[in-house]
Image (tube, coloured by chain):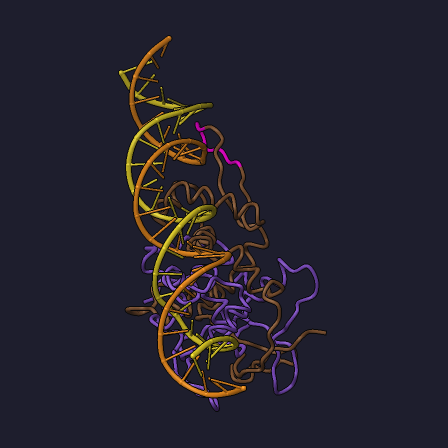
Chain colours: A purple, B brown, C yellow, D orange
Amino acid sequence: MGGVRGVVIDNDRCSIARALGVLGERWSLQIVRDVFNGVRRFDALQQHLAIARNVLTNRLHGLVEAGLLERRPYQEFGSRVRYEYDLTPAGRDLWPVLMSLMAWGDRHLADGPPPVEPEHVDCGGRVKLVPVCEHGHTVDPKQLGLRLSR
Amino acid sequence: MGGVRGVVIDNDRCSIARALGVLGERWSLQIVRDVFNGVRRFDALQQHLAIARNVLTNRLHGLVEAGLLERRPYQEFGSRVRYEYDLTPAGRDLWPVLMSLMAWGDRHLADGPPPVEPEHVDCGGRVKLVPVCEHGHTVDPKQLGLRLSR
DNA sequence: TGGCTGGGTTCCGTTTGACAACCCAGGGAG
DNA sequence: CTCCCTGGGTTGTCAAACGGAACCCAGCCA
């Protein structure tokens, strides 16, 4: 990947292409990000994202159907049952995608210092994603390649 | 991010939202992935991705304008000058996004073993992205938080 | 009884995408 | 010299997706 190694497979077998089939438009990942941050209700999402209400409905249903979100009832005192959306394990597994997108945006699209940063809650240190191989080496991006798997 | 910490910022200052402004649709990241793998020419991209030609034209121009690709002339023996697209440093910096999307797709959308795997070319080991904090701790995803930066 | 609120659905006009046909420059075959 | 082929597009047409705004409905509350 750092260099060209010419490993090209059928596009429809590619996991990146499949992932983009679910996540490949403007809103899905932003919704997932907001849900990560505790924004779980229709109105809150609609206001924070400034997304059209019908589009939000469609995306939420789509994400539920794709198994990334779960729609579930909750009830507050003196209110009828309402619904909120929460991440499933598959949705929660998207954190590396969000982290790497955020890091890239911070580096290449920012007009100032990054507004938020990921931290290790135990020690307060800033966190980065680092490529590590199964033998424990930290991998220089130039030494990253692709291999057809056995 | 692992837990809810309620750090919600303006959506238009969010690097994820900005990144999705450039990359947030079906094709851009697939084009970047193909260029990583050495597919650089219009026709080759069009055939591999099965994308409409006018859409490919639009995407390529958009990616050039966004500074992720560079359009440059090349010449083969007995042919006139033609053009190919190559990654700029900003485009090359997207490898963690592609890696994390691929890992997620492999885990949650695959119908068999992953077709390709990232490897450390020096030692042949499989590579994963690991969150590491500035104090050198490997961070458990549950210990990942967000902090408003100073 | 009527209003307010959360969580939508419906309608309509605009944008974006897919598919197919066409274009154009230069090299090579006849 | 003419014709055709190839890479790299552009143009035209139609369908799907998006945005904005209006409408709806159930239940709590005054």
Q: What x and y, as percent, mark residue B45?
A: 40, 46
Q: Nearer the viewer, residue A74 or B147?
A: A74
* Residue furthest bottom in the image: A77
Q: Quadrant of the C terminus of chain A?
A: bottom left
Give the residues in magenta.
B73-79
Is residue A107 located in the magenta-colored stretch of the structure? no
Is residue B74 located in the magenta-colored stretch of the structure? yes
Q: What x and y, as percent, mark residue B90?
A: 58, 55
Q: What x and y, as percent, mark residue B134?
A: 65, 77
Quarter where residue A112 is shown: bottom right
Q: Residue at x 52, y 84 (%)?
A: B142
Q: Is residue B60 above or below residue B15?
A: above
Q: Nearer the viewer, residue C1 or A128?
A: C1
User: Would you say D29 lies left or right of A16 here?
Assistant: right
* Residue furthest right in the image: B150
For the question of whether residue A40 can be seen, the reply is no
Q: Is residue B141 above or below residue D22?
A: below
Q: Is residue B76 above or below residue B119?
A: above
Q: Nearer the viewer, residue A124 or B89?
A: A124
Q: Residue at x 66, y 67 (%)?
A: A114
Q: Nearer the viewer, residue B57 or A43?
A: A43
Q: What x and y, as percent, mark residue B54?
A: 41, 41
Q: Residue at x 49, y 74 (%)?
A: A95
Q: Is residue B59 above or below residue A138?
A: above
The tally of labels here is: 0
Q: Residue at x 52, y 46 (%)?
A: B62
User: Would you say C18 lies left or right of B150 here?
Assistant: left
For the question of whether residue B105 can be seen, the reply is yes
